[in-house]
Amino acid sequence: MRISRWLADRWVMIVALLVLGYLALPILVVAGLSFNRPSSRLSYDFNEFTLDNWRQPCATSDMCDAVVRSVQIGFIATVVATVLGTLMAFALVRHRFRGRSGINVLIFLPMATPELVMGTSLLALFVSAGVPQGFWTIVIAHVMFCVSFVVVTVKARLAGMDRRLEEAAMDLYANEWQTFRRITLPLVLPGIVAAALLAFSLSFDDFIITNFNAGTTVTFPMYVWGAAQRGIPPQVNVIGTAMFAIALLLVGLSSLRGRRARRAALLAGPVPQARRSS
Amino acid sequence: MTLLAPTGSGHPPPAPPAARSGRRRLLPYLLLLPGAAWLLIFFGVPLLQLAAASLYDPSGSLSTGYAMTWAFGNYPDVVQAYWPQLLRSFGYAGLALVLALLLGYPLAYAIAQKAGRWKNLLLVCVVAPMFTSFLVRTLAWKTILSDNGALVGLLRDVHLLAPDGRLLATPFAVVLGLTYNFLPFLVLPLYASLERLDPRLLEAATDLYASPAQAFRRVTLPLSMPGLVAGTLLFFIPASGDYINAELLGTPNEYMIGNVIDSAFLVRLDYPQGAALSFLLMAAILAVVFGYLRRAGTEEVL
């Protein structure tokens, strides 16, 4: 009786933890396989423990070339998309103008369109215009699908900002440029950084759109796709695990910073007991 | 704000009001121009080009060039040739969606209402799969579902699977992969809705003699509807267009429409056919989405 009562109170949490286990399982497998010496090129089973893959992550040099290329593409696409998207976000939040709903639709549509359709349509454009496909067509495609996500992210931050801080700066004899550089930009920066990180991760991991617009250029996801047919080198799992670790580190750092900022605000604030009650 | 600008020494004098307001009116368009132009040229124009390519003369080829013949016959042709893959795409995506709702709703609810101070940590766990590469984590399922793996061994031992039964290279593996890969897209908006749910409403329902099931159906579910609708769409759109799971975890018997489009463009180089299939996929998804939104009755989501 007591057990069934206990279960009735907690079954939602138990199911939730099981589902989280389902989500975590492949990550654990990837981490495990990064220490595997496979029995054959086409085997996906765990065979023997080894540290070789971590010692020589670039034993298959095409894979590391592909990783480097993905980082380059991700970096350029992120910079361009972040600049374009941030400008658009400022226009949308700070200005009234005609054609706003049209712009909103233009920003929303790429997020709702299947990647397959965006990839094939861009391919159709490049082929009919006679543009040779390669590194730069991938960059163009990545900027295209990242811009919308940047706009949404920066817009959210900008919309939640207290306009009175800028007015105060102007009252204190700052001109528009000074106000922007000393007040607006630092306040929006976390949103811009978050948008840039999002754009980079979208670009780095994109397969479908890249696949249609890469020509013979090979990015990391395209390398994995090709290798899946020929046999996956175990170093792929090293890259997968390293990506996961870096992302986790970034999230950990940002939450630590957030917590410290909140604590500082708490110490400076007049009602420190307010938090305890919440 | 220009009224507040100072005129004291060390500061440039404010521009004449007329020129100032003219520039102000132009400014939003200048800010929007680069991004909007990029989206128009590399998202809008290509869609038109794809529509045109779907009407090219199907007897042309990439080397000889295609003639625009308004060949609307391409559409019935591709449906006739590939209706099983089209149906399968929506069938698998639909099945995966049902599975994802069964798994994702309790998860979102638990994080939003029951997790307390563990909330942020659990949320990180939900998005954690996205920290690593889509393809690499999908390949991990090949190891988990492998014929020599522990899972297949266990299922064979308890006779849930025939002695020569497999998990990999079956429709089950593909649906499982789709569910896994797109589950976070369903959980996050659902969580956002459920987080705003006031627990006192549920207490009120219980006080008024509602059973837990009734309280869920009459209070929790309707209030989570916006998140449910958004999450369902964010799950269904990429899942029905996906072909990575079918390729890596299935066989040609499990191919979805994406596999056919991929080979039409990149292997067979049959552009009119590939373009017609792409357009058909988009039209079908839009039809499903709008039909669903009308039934769900929450059009403000878009």
Image (tube, grey):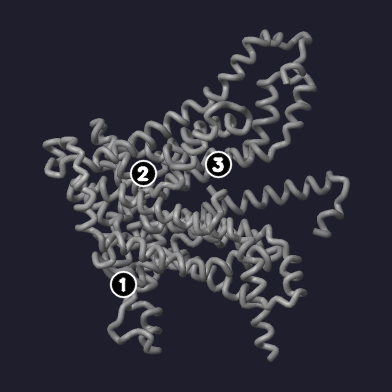
Q: Are marks 1 and 2 on the same chain?
A: no
Measured Cα–Cα span from mark 3 to mark 2? 19 Å
Q: Position of residue B53 (x, y in %)?
A: 24, 40
Instruction: List the residue tagged with mark 2.
Output: A118
Q: Residue at x 33, y 57 (%)?
A: B243
Q: Position of residue A127 (x, y in %)?
A: 24, 36
Residue A2, image quadrant: bottom right
Residue B288, image quadrant: bottom left
Disc on res. A152: 3
Q: Chain of mark 1?
A: B
Crowd tier of the residue under label 2, counting other residues whose Cα lies within 10 Å: few below 14, some 14–19, many 20 or above: many
Instruction: Identify the amino acid type marked 1.
Output: Thr
Q: Are marks 1 and 3 on the same chain?
A: no
Q: Is residue A90 above or below residue A226?
A: above
Q: Are marks 1 and 2 in contact (CB under 8 Å)?
A: no
Question: Which element is circle 2 on?
Answer: helix
Q: Chain of mark 2?
A: A
Measured Cα–Cα span from mark 1 to mark 2? 29 Å
Q: Is residue B81 above or below residue A99?
A: below
Q: Nearer the viewer, residue B175 or A180?
A: B175
Q: Position of residue A124 (x, y in %)?
A: 27, 39
Instruction: List the residue tagged with mark 1.
Output: B170
B89 on left or right of A10: left
B86 on left or right of A157: left
Q: Are marks 3 and 2 in contact (CB under 8 Å)?
A: no
Disc on res. B125: none
Q: Chain of mark 3?
A: A
Q: Residue at x 70, y 76 (%)?
A: B210
Residue B221 visible in the snapshot: yes
Q: Are marks 1 and 3 in contact (CB under 8 Å)?
A: no
